[in-house]
Image: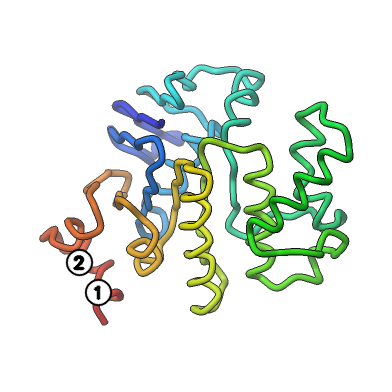
Amino acid sequence: MIQLVNVFKFFGSKRALNNINLTIADGETLAIIGGSGSGKSTLLRLMIGLIKPSSGNIFIDGEDIGKFSEEEMTRVRLKMGMVFQYSALFDSMTVGENVAFGLVEHSDLPQDKINKIVTEKLHQVGLEGVENLMPNELSGGMKKRVSLARAIAFEPKIIFYDEPSSGLDPVTTTKIDELIISTQKALNVTSIVVTHDMVSACHIADRIAMVYNGDLIAVDTVENFKKINDPRIKEFFRVVDN
């Protein structure tokens, strides 16, 4: 579903990513981990097409998006759903309007059909009867759920999650993890989760990829990842074992 081939990214003279080669299979859940400034968010932005690689190729569902125009990227992004770190809901819109936003902007569906999809997607993420609430009336966990409902409204092939457990308590984090798992199973989507939360990564992922100072230092299954004898990886796993 996604393939990065010899990808470099520079911001001025600073090298943010160094010769990244990564293949993400259709229907897989991949967790991308790394510390602050490691390059994992840059990797996410490249896959979404928000920034271009300095060199190398990025394929999304067989298409090389590296040199796509913004119009071409808009078409590709209709295959994608995005759950942002802080939910990124529109404060001036109701929950229902937030979930419907992409459908209103990028489809010709009648309003009654859009309303039905909104209800279905909110139900799918465990929320019902909240269409008329405003974002400021929701808890942090509910906002994440609404953000996911918006992300899946277009029936995407790929869902990107940017730090989905950020700012949440451990109980709510576990619920969001379970929601990521259930969404992947229900929709058979490819899920890419950028996180610094090793506990969540181990819970939700088929494989884990670790970025360190712009280098992709390891990609493997959770069980194999735990056996890698690298101090940079062991430091991340220490929190899981304690």
Would residue 183 be found to the left or right of residue 4 on screen?
A: right
Q: Does dot 1 land on a helix, a strand or a loop?
A: helix
How packed mark 2 is, by other alpha carbons closer than 10 Å (few <14, some 14-19, many 20 or more), is: some
Closer to the camera, 159 or 56?
159
Q: Which residue is mark 2?
A: 234
Amino acid type at circle 2 is: Lys
**Residue 134 x/y as whole percent:** 84, 63
Closer to the camera, 89 or 146?
146
Residue at the bottom extreme? Answer: 242
Instruction: Identify the residue shown where x is 58% and y is 37%.
Output: 156
**Residue 199 x/y as whole percent:** 36, 69
Residue 168 versus residue 217 in the image, above or below: below
Q: Are marks 1 and 2 in contact (CB under 8 Å)?
A: yes
- Disc marking residue 79: none
How packed mark 1 is, by other alpha carbons closer than 10 Å (few <14, some 14-19, many 20 or more), is: few
Q: How is the image coloured?
A: rainbow
Residue at the left extreme? Answer: 229
Q: Which residue is mark 1?
A: 238
**Residue 166 x/y as whole percent:** 53, 66
Residue 113 versus residue 201 in the image, above or below: above
Q: Does dot 2 land on a helix, a strand or a loop?
A: helix
Instruction: Identify the residue shown where x is 49% and y is 22%.
Output: 65
Residue 200 versus residue 70 in the image, above or below: below
**Residue 169 x/y as whole percent:** 54, 78
Residue 35 found in image quarter: bottom left
Amino acid type at circle 1 is: Arg
Instruction: Identify the residue shown where x is 24% and y is 47%.
Output: 219
Instruction: Identify the residue shown where x is 43% and y is 58%.
Output: 195
Residue 88 found in image quarter: bottom right
CA–CA distance between discs 1 and 2? 6 Å
Q: How many marks?
A: 2
Q: Quadrant of the N terminus?
A: top left
